[in-house]
Image: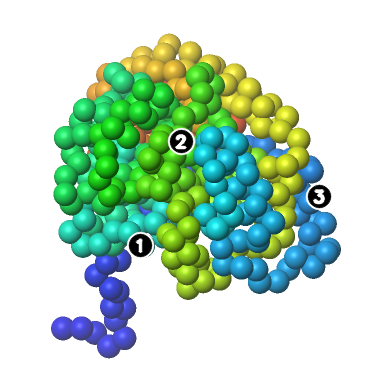
Amino acid sequence: MIKPHELRLAKRMARLGTETAFEVLVKAKALEAQGRDIVHLEIGEPDFDTPRNIIDAGCDALHKGFTHYGPSAGLMELREVISQHVSDTRCVHVTPDEVVVVPGGKPIIFFSILALVEDGDEVIYPNPGFPIYESMINYVGAKAVPIHLREELDFRLDVHELAGMINDHTKLIILNSPQNPTGGVLEKKDIDAIARAIGDRSIMVLSDEIYSRLIFEGEHHSIMSIDGMKERTILLDGFSKTYAMTGWRMGYGVMRADLAAHIARLMTNSSSCTASFTQIAGIEALHGPQESVDQMRAEFKKRRDVMVTGLNEIKGFSCRLPHGAFYVFPNITNTGWPSKKLADALLDDAGVAALSGTAFGAFGEGYLRFSVANSIENIEKALDRIADWANKNL
């Protein structure tokens, strides 16, 4: 019997997932409030300040009156800059009407799946992978089809396995390179093979390239650059990771113009538009000096090396060298502990906040994710604490 005024949620809310990093952050902050010293390696956010020239551009835009509504697809000035940037970096011709600016990267995931995917459709997505992919596929009532990213392939997907998953129900394939949580990077041969596996089918690809400027070895390759794939690719990129602008909430999607018009309508129906002054700052980010990006990438590489070397010296841990993003994804099966239980123990007993691999899907069992978006001093402190914990408990 339904009680009076009982909250009656729509059934689809039961299918909506979450992002565990924020839950762990809340728990870690609560421990700090109790006086505990916690090393934060859980959150996927650069620990650098937004470059000064970008901040100044945003402040100047506020003073100049960029405090009002703008077009749902984004200011034309920024869309022109983005279209030129993508044209130059992906070697394709992009026009402003193929660009939609949104508050963060997630809306492109959300809107693309809402616009394209229906009941009975299948969406292939990387697992372990960014949890919002699976969450949104389930939310719209489609079938989430995980492709296992395996450690022995440096967490690159097996293209032969992907080809076997594609069928008449496949509506969308999600790619992410450099990849969260593993740091895996797809090579040119992988991208070429994925395009061949898709062939001439009317399957869209959502290519999440939010970490494209944070590659340590090799080069970034986009499936949008492959002949015949531009009209079937939705490119997701943004400013959060590259320019340490997470709090500014600004990302963008690049896609065929007819789809972009529908994505812009979803913006109209949800957020109306992205904040205008942040978009002016985005123009400065892309047009201004890029030294800060190079410096941040170099620092993340140093931290990655320290973290991987240290983890490989700890009992029960083994860690491959990730080639991009700012995460490491060590294998912890030799500890004998399940991932979630171990992540909880490291936070509660050792004061190190990390994420269970299962926060990124079922195939993440046996792994942890550490962010290296912290100082080398704190990373070394975390390694000492983890080693001490392992010596006492393993």
**Label 1 belongs to which residue?**
114
**Alpha carbon separation for disc pair 3 and 2:** 34 Å
Q: Secondary structure at mark 2?
A: helix
Task: Specify the amino acid type for callout 3.
Answer: Asp
Dot 2: few (<14), some (14–19), or many (≥20) neighbours within 10 Å?
some
Numbered disc in front, either 1 or 2: 2
Tag 1 near tag 3, CB within 8 Å: no
Q: Mark 3 highlights which residue?
A: 56
* Residue visible at 35% across and 62% down in the picture: 114
Q: Quadrant of residue 71?
A: bottom right
Quadrant of the image containing the C terminus = top left
Describe residue 286's horizontal placement relative to residue 56 as left or right: left
At label 3, counting other C-alpha atoms closer than 10 Å, the crowd grade (few under 14, some 14-19, many 20 or more) is: few
Residue ID at (18%, 51%): 169
CA separation, marks 1 and 3? 36 Å
Residue linked to disc 2: 225
Judged from the image, the secondary structure of the residue bearing numbered disc 1 is: helix
- Residue in view at x 61 percent, y 61 percent: 74
Q: In front here: 265 or 304?
A: 265
Vertical comparison of 57 with 333: above or below: below
Whole-angstrom CA distance, mark 1 to mark 2, is: 25 Å
- Disc 1 to disc 2: CB gap under 8 Å: no
Residue 50 placed where, x, y %? 70, 43
Residue 62, visible in the rendered structure: yes
User: Along the polypeptide, which appears first: circle 1 or circle 2?
Assistant: 1
Q: Amino acid at mark 1?
A: Leu
Residue 33: percent from the left, percent from the top? 57, 48
In the picture as drawn, the residue positioned furthest to the bottom comes out as 4
